[in-house]
Image (cartoon, helix red, strand yellow):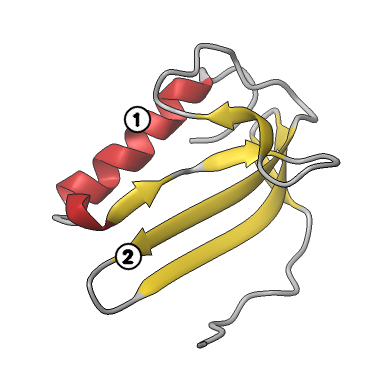
Amino acid sequence: MVKAGIVAGEVAKKFEAYFKEKGYAANYLYGPCHGLGMLEVEKPWIETTSEYKLQENMTFQIDTFVRDKYFGLRWETGAVIKKNGIELLSDKIKGIVEL
């Protein structure tokens, strides 16, 4: 659902709705993306209130965090917005790191 021309807020709304539909609303903390540049968690953010359209070659950090009483899970990777989807910036971290 992430590609050039899509309103950023629609991505966030669908992302959040997915958690609710699957019964995990209580586990949802934030998401799904933030800007990627010189600083950690910089603008622009993809939030339910975001009204801008995604444009080709914008870069984002896909940043997902879920939690419950006993665990937390964070998944993060960089991506470039393309006409028909995204291009991941790395495929190096594909496994689970348990701390």
Q: Residue at x 53, y 30 (%)?
A: 46
Name of the residue lying farthest toward the top: 51
Q: Earlier in the sequence, mark 2 or mark 1?
A: 1
**Image location (x, y in percent) of residue 2:** 55, 35
**Image location (x, y in percent) of residue 45:** 58, 30
Identify the amino acid type marked 2: Arg
Numbered label attached to residue 65: none
- Depth-wise, is mark 2 or mark 1 nearer the camera? 2
Identify the amino acid type marked 1: Lys
53 horizontally vs 47: left or right: right
**Image location (x, y in percent) of residue 99:** 52, 87
Please tell me in which quadrant of the rendered image residue 60 appears.
top right
Q: Nearer the viewer, residue 12 or 74?
A: 74
15 horizontally vs 8: left or right: left
Q: Secondary structure at mark 1?
A: helix
Q: Residues within 10 Å of mark 2 (few under 14, many from 20)?
A: some
Q: Residues within 10 Å of mark 1 (few under 14, many from 20)?
A: some
In the image, residue 43 above or below residue 71: above
Using the numbered discs, state the Cα–Cα distance from disc 2 to disc 1 in whole angstroms.
19 Å
Q: Secondary structure at mark 2?
A: strand
Q: Residue at x 45, y 31 (%)?
A: 11
In this figure, which residue is indicated by the disc labeled 1? 13
Q: Nearer the viewer, residue 45 or 23?
A: 45
In this figure, which residue is indicated by the disc labeled 2? 67
Q: How many numbered markers are drawn? A: 2
Q: Residue at x 38, y 71 (%)?
A: 72
